């Protein structure tokens, strides 16, 4: 569809910076000319708005504390301690004991040493499947690379079935060629499967100076294990390059007892509130677990972690992170207190953050949080519209006619109402 600025159906004069409602442009292709004080560049100085119906904004995030998923110690110095298990869920840090690494020795061919047998798909011609399971030349050279960008598999036959609850993945180099996403599966049939998914990871960047450790819940012993790599840090243009993979088990994890530790949302996973004035928090849901002997509490910040608050039964009360053990609120109470709250009624409206306090009295158990979901209902109103030139695929197309006139076009929406305002910069 083409647009001709000489066929405008309406002209509105704007004499100040206040928004002007132009018209209900009910037919796709309708156009309007705005006459306004002289400006040098309409594309940047004319703010265009479109009427929108009521909407719902949902934020879900599981990026706790930092990209490496740290648990922050409850102390004045805020010492950060690497979390194991990490990345898929926030837990207390753990110390491993009695863990066996499989294969127990470095493989030298696809079938040696006995009883191990290696298999793989999409490997670069310079590498054979067993190379992923080697433990020589670690961190000095690439052990295994794939010929198809992003993707490939490496599998191992252990000879006997055993219960695994963890594994190692090491990158040859951190950065573009490091594996970023994969699935670990188990089978008791063959190296070709069928496979049962045991663990799936995304948005990873395993270390190159030592392998990163991952753990998962599993109660079934498997003889065959397979890693299916599906993405790299650099995306589709880069092949995954590994320095090793290994299966962990059997083993045990010991969690610290008697002390509460805390972690917070990161800058990338908090919820910005400034754009939702007039909105209402429909619900806040925590996906979490509190096994026997564990405690999980939380605090909330409404001002990008400048202050932290707990719910005292009737109001949000200021406290500090170091007091989370004494004043932290149950996650159920936080959910209940936030549900139905309007954004404008909150103590501040800049950024919604959470802190979680984790504690256990049982060394074998840890509380965990794997996801928080925030749903905000936004009433009908005006929001900034995406603008473009003639023929834009956005609702509103915009073109500068003269220094004092701008043409707007209803590109795609048959029920569009347009506002415009000069933007002071």
Image (cartoon, rainbow, N blue to C red):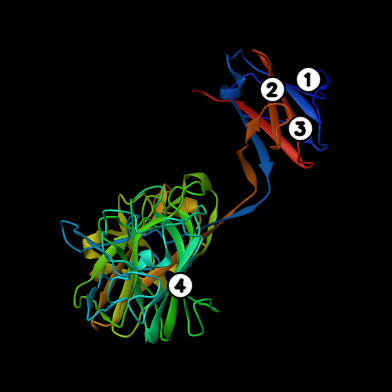
> Is residue 52 shown left or right of residue 137?
right
Given this view, does label 1 or label 3 mark the residue nearer the observer?
1
Q: Which residue is mark 1?
A: 5
Q: Secondary structure at mark 2?
A: strand
Q: Which residue is mark 3?
A: 23
C-alpha distance separating marks 3 and 2: 18 Å
Residue 158: x percent and y percent?
38, 81
Quick one: label 4 or label 3, which is nearer the N terminus? 3
| Quarter assignment of residue 61 | bottom left
| Residue contact between numbered discs 4 and 1, judged by CB atoms under 8 Å | no
* 15 is higher (above) or lower (below) than 161: above
Q: Which residue is mark 4?
A: 226
Quick one: label 4 or label 1, which is nearer the N terminus? 1
Residue 371: x percent and y percent?
44, 66
> Is residue 372 shown left or right of residue 278?
left
C-alpha distance separating marks 1 and 3: 17 Å
Q: Nearer the viewer, residue 207 or 139?
A: 139
Q: Secondary structure at mark 1?
A: helix
How packed mark 2 is, by other alpha carbons closer than 10 Å (few <14, some 14-19, many 20 or more), is some
For residue 216, say whether it is visible: yes
Quick one: label 1 or label 3, which is nearer the N terminus? 1
Q: Which quarter shows the N terminus? A: top right
How packed mark 1 is, by other alpha carbons closer than 10 Å (few <14, some 14-19, many 20 or more), is some
Quick one: label 3 or label 2, which is nearer the N terminus? 3
Residue 327: x percent and y percent?
27, 68
For residue 311, say whether it is visible: no
Given this view, does label 4 or label 1 mark the residue nearer the observer?
4
């Amino acid at each position: 569809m083409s647009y001709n600025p000489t066929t405008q159906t309406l002209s509105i004069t704007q004499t100040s910076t206040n928004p002007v409602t132009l018209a209900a442009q009910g037919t796709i292709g309708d156009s309007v000319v705005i006459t306004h004080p002289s400006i040098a560049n309409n594309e940047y100085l004319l703010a265009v708005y479109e009427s929108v119906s009521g909407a719902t904004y949902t934020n879900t995030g599981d990026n706790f504390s930092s990209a490496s998923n740290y648990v922050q110690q409850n102390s004045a110095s805020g010492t950060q301690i690497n979390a194991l298990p990490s990345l898929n869920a926030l837990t207390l840090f753990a110390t491993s004991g009695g863990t066996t690494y499989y294969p127990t020795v470095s493989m030298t061919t696809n079938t040696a040493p006995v009883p191990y047998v290696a298999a793989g798909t999409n490997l670069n011609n310079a590498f054979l499947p067993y190379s992923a399971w080697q433990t020589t030349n670690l961190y000095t050279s690439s052990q295994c690379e794939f010929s198809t960008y992003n993707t490939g598999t490496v599998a191992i036959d252990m000879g006997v079935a055993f219960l695994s609850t963890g594994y190692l993945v090491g990158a040859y180099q951190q950065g573009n060629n490091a594996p970023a996403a994969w699935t670990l599966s188990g089978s008791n049939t063959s190296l070709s499967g069928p496979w049962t998914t045991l663990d799936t990871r995304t948005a990873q960047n395993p270390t190159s100076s030592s392998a990163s450790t991952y753990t998962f819940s599993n109660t079934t012993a498997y003889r065959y294990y397979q890693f299916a790599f599906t993405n790299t840090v650099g995306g589709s243009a880069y092949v995954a390059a590994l320095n090793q993979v290994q299966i962990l088990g059997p083993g045990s994890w010991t969690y610290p007892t008697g002390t509460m530790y805390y972690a917070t949302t990161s800058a990338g996973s908090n919820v910005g509130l400034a754009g939702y004035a007039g909105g209402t928090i429909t619900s806040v849901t925590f996906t979490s677990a509190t096994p026997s002997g564990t405690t999980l509490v939380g605090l909330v910040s409404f001002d990008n972690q400048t202050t932290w608050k707990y719910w005292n039964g009737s109001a949000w009360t200021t406290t500090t992170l170091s007091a989370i053990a004494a004043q932290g609120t149950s996650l159920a109470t936080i959910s209940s207190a936030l549900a139905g709250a309007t954004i404008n009624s909150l103590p501040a409206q800049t950024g919604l953050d959470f802190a979680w306090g984790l504690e256990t009295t049982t060394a074998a158990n840890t509380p965990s949080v794997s996801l928080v979901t925030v749903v905000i209902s936004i009433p009908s109103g005006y929001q900034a519209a995406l603008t473009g030139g003639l023929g834009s695929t956005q609702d509103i197309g915009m073109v500068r006619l003269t220094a004092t006139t701008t043409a707007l076009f209803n590109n795609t929406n048959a029920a569009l109402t347009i506002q415009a305002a000069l933007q002071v910069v």
